[in-house]
Amino acid sequence: ASSMKALICGVAGQDGSYLAELLVRKGYGVVGTSRDSMITSFSSLERLGIQNDLQTTSMAINDFHSVLNVVWRHQPGEISKPERFVTQKIVRADARISLGSGETLQLGNIDIWRDWGRAPDYVDAMWRILQQSMAEDFVYATGKTNSSEYLVSTAFAFLNLSWKNHVKVNASLFRPSDINQSSANPSKAKRILDREAKVDLESVIERMCETAVAIEMKYKN
């Protein structure tokens, strides 16, 4: 199999689309999957201008035979599987509310502290990790920890909204397994991968909100 062919599981998502853009620019043949590629909206790929630069196919990540069939058919040299994050739920609702949706955003525990970063930085790190001659574990992060409440309040303030007027903390959405506070030391990644996440959280939130508003305006129209 060619090491220049990559399979991205969940290519329609935020990280998946950014990873596809990165790999397309590096000359990879990219195959992107979704649960049903015939009905999935690949608007994120369209927004990045790469919808015609990769193949898309259906694959259920929890179905062994489905995964095996796609891997056997396309013979990728690299596989990454990006994850979806609550940040998208927050900024998309924030955008809709700013456009007059009148909805209330339901969230779980917002007293959770995390190291938040910028998706394109992380997908670049994913690629760099896959280029190492030996498999190793890396912690990639900004090294700064902020609360979910700070993220929510900053996102709503950016669109001139007071989050307390539009957000309800719903105890039924709390997850007992959630770690209350996590912090990260990215020094190994910086040393070996020669890369560090430098973008501050406020800039990340601003970019996400601008994108979310553009998307919701397109849907609204």
Image (cartoon, rainbow, N blue to C red):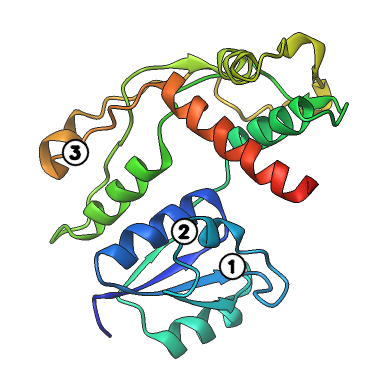
Indicate the quadrant where residue 127 lies. bottom left
Which mark, residue 113?
A: none
Is 89 left or right of 221, judged from the image as shown?
Answer: left
Q: Element at badge 1?
A: loop
Which residue in the structure is indicated by mark 2?
81
| Residue in the picture at 33% in, 67% down | 24
Residue designated by label 1? 61
Q: Residue at x 62, y 35 (%)?
A: 86
- Which residue is nearer to you in this view: 12 or 45? 45
- The x and y percentages for residue 90 are 66, 30
Q: Is residue 85 visible?
A: yes
Instruction: Determine crowd level at label 3: few under 14, some 14-19, many 20+ residues with C-alpha closer than 10 A.
Output: some
Q: Position of residue 208 (x, y in %)?
A: 53, 34
Per the image, the residue denoted by label 3 is 195
The residue type indicated by label 2 comes to Lys
Report the mark closest to the observer, 2 or 3.
3
Q: Is residue 98 above or below residue 57?
A: above
Asked whether, in this view, residue 84 is left or right of residue 169, the answer is: left
Residue closest to the far right: 102
Q: Residue at x 29, y 49 (%)?
A: 124
Label 3, label 1: how many angstroms apart (C-alpha)? Answer: 30 Å
Horizontal and vertical percent position of residue 141 = 33, 31
Q: CA distance from mark 1 to mark 2?
A: 9 Å
CB under 8 Å between discs 1 and 2:
yes
Q: Disc 3 marks which amino acid?
A: Arg
- Mark 3–mark 1 CB contact (< 8 Å): no
Q: Residues within 10 Å of mark 1 (few under 14, many from 20)?
A: some
Image quarter where the N terminus lies is: bottom left
